[in-house]
Amino acid sequence: MTAEDNPFPAGSQQRAVRWMTRYLRAPAKLGDIREAEGPGKGADRRRAIRLQTGAIRNLRLYRHVLDQHLRRRPAPAAEAILLLALAESDHAGGSTAVRPRLVHSWVDQAREAGLRAGTVRLVNAVLRRATATLEGIRADPASVPEAVFTSHPDWLVERWRERWGPAETSRLLQWNQRTPELYAHGPAASLAGEAAGPESPLQPTRWPHFHRLPRGIPPEVQEGLRAGTWTIRDPATRIAVEATLARPSGRVLDLCASPGGKSRGLLADPRGPRELVAADLPPRLGLLRANLAPWPARAVARPLDLGEDDPLPAEHGSFDAVLLDAPCSNTGVLRRRPDARWRLRPEDLRALPPRQLAYLRRAARLVVPGGILVYSTCSLEVEENREVVDAFLAGAEGRAFRLETAVLARPTRTGHDGAGVYRMLRDDSPVR
């Protein structure tokens, strides 16, 4: 296969094989696996990301296909090649015309990876049959269980069916299988004429100042990212930003802020704070600082561990608004983070809420009387959203607050990532 007829040439295939093999040996966040190889740019890296992400998004389905042609699961390096080859076959639409070339290219990768001759022959034989099997399942989705076809854990699918019913769950499962779109938030004043055309690098959306980027980040937006007038973020992030800026704020604290998308949204807004403190764990500060670079006089990244009982004792009652973007299950962003569905376990939904509640109580101490506390997640689960907020308001720290707005954005209803956002106002009594 040549670069002309293969959207995933040898360089991107090799990189994806390295990443996928590491993932299969020790599952971790895809971003962490990729960054461990060092930061990089370029077309080959982008293609490798697309290829590996496709394999992870369809991991359960692809393993179901391979299990029909294997007596046992192969070693990680061989399985990585098989899974990635099925991802490329999916990308090609299961075309029988390209299948022989596709199989040949991945057999070459098996040789390049140093697999034994017998394993190379196995890869060749399995792929020739498995690509056809996958094509048959794609043509008849009802031939396999819905959780298999959409590559979700059974327990999560059953949970959603009990909560929302089968039809809504099916819509959500299908949503999670789509490739996420890229959005930028910014003025686009100079590009207004271009934005109206179907070939424009910026497409308008129904969300004010959010633009779809169908062909990557154009130069004008790249310049705006450096200047601080543009931000790459999903429209769902606007809900927490709007809630935090609901009242004039001179000083704002963004907790669990990395990588900094919401911080940038706060700073770029005309109503933005005079001073923003963006805090997170020390290992996460590098990217956060880079994202705050356009505002050296207004923003600072600070190391902070909300796991400590009182992480900022000298700052009690000193912030006009505090945004807590709490660690969560990520069930609202499984389309964007497909690896999260394989890390999540039922017990996580019992372990996370107490931690989130503890973080919210600590965040509350930092809000000035009359100020705003915003609790935000990218989860769809009630245990991590309204139940955490209700438990907080019923406790000692929460009695000084009242809930002003509550939003649970489900992707199938909103057309963007899922999010839970709850804005609470502190009364004007003295800080205790």
Image (tube, grey):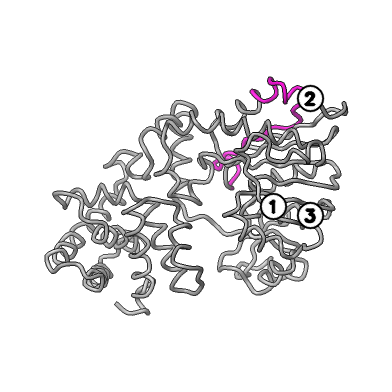
Name the outermost residue toward the left: 118
Q: Amino acid at mark 1?
A: Arg
Q: CA distance from mark 3 to mark 1?
A: 21 Å
Q: What is the x, y in percent for residue 228?
A: 74, 64
Which quarter of the figure is the N terminus placed in? bottom left
Residue at 82% over, 51% down: 273
Residue 269, label in figure: 3
From the viewer's side, name the closer residue of 374 and 200: 374
Sequence-first tag of 2 and 1 = 1
How busy is the neighbourhood of tag 1: few (under 14 within 10 Å), some, or many (20 plus)?
some
Residue 429 shows in this picture? yes
Query: Which residue is disc 1 drawn over?
Result: 302
Determine the secondary structure under disc 3. Answer: loop
Query: Which residue is disc 2 drawn over?
Result: 400
Sequence-first tag of 2 and 3 = 3
Residues at badges 2 and 1 in contact (C-beta under 8 Å)? no
Which residues are drawn in magenta? 391-416
Sequence-first tag of 3 and 1 = 3
Q: Amino acid at mark 2?
A: Ala
Determine the secondary structure under disc 2. Answer: helix
Q: What is the x, y in percent for residue 162?
A: 45, 26
